[in-house]
Image: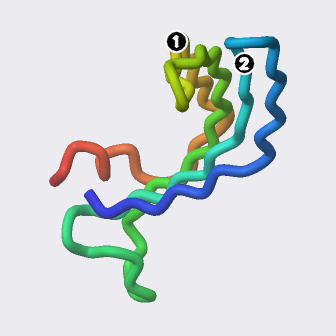
């Protein structure tokens, strides 16, 4: 599957070695190998909300818990089947 994802609005709160981050992601999906061609009409577009708890692991942070909530969907859901 050919996809494009845009993630935005990422408010983050940090408390010592833990943090919480929220974000919105818009994801455009096309059948494998088709990509975003102008003549392509078969696609799936979705918006998800992400809510993540993070914990410090040395110099980086790792996701301890992630919740993904589908806000809306538009298009052809069979795109995800790879047909």
Residue 46: give its label.
Answer: none
- Give the image quarter of residue 16: top right
Which element is circle 1 on? Answer: strand
Does the residue at mark 2 contact the one at mark 1 (Cβ under 8 Å)? Answer: no
- Decide: is 74 above or below 14: below
Q: Looking at the image, which residue sits at the far front?
A: 58
- Give the image quarter of residue 23: top right
Which element is circle 2 on? Answer: strand
Among the two numbered marks 2 and 1 on one chain, the one whose residue lies closer to the N terminus: 2
In the image, 45 versus 6, the foreground residue is 6
In the image, 33 versus 55, the foreground residue is 55
- CA distance for labels 2 and 1: 10 Å
Left or right: residue 71 versus residue 30 is right
Q: Which residue is mark 2?
A: 19
Q: Which residue is mark 1?
A: 64
What number of labels is visible? 2
Residue 58 is situated, as x and y percent measured from the top left of the image, at 51, 22
């Amino acid at each position: 599957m050919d996809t494009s994802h845009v993630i935005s609005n990422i408010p983050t709160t940090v408390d010592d070695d833990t943090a919480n981050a929220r974000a919105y992601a818009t994801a455009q999906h096309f059948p494998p190998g088709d990509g975003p061609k102008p003549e392509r009409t078969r696609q799936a577009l979705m918006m998800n909300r992400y809510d993540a708890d993070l914990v410090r692991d040395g110099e980086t942070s790792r996701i301890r818990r992630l919740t993904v909530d589908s806000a809306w969907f538009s298009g052809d859901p069979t795109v995800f089947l790879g047909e």
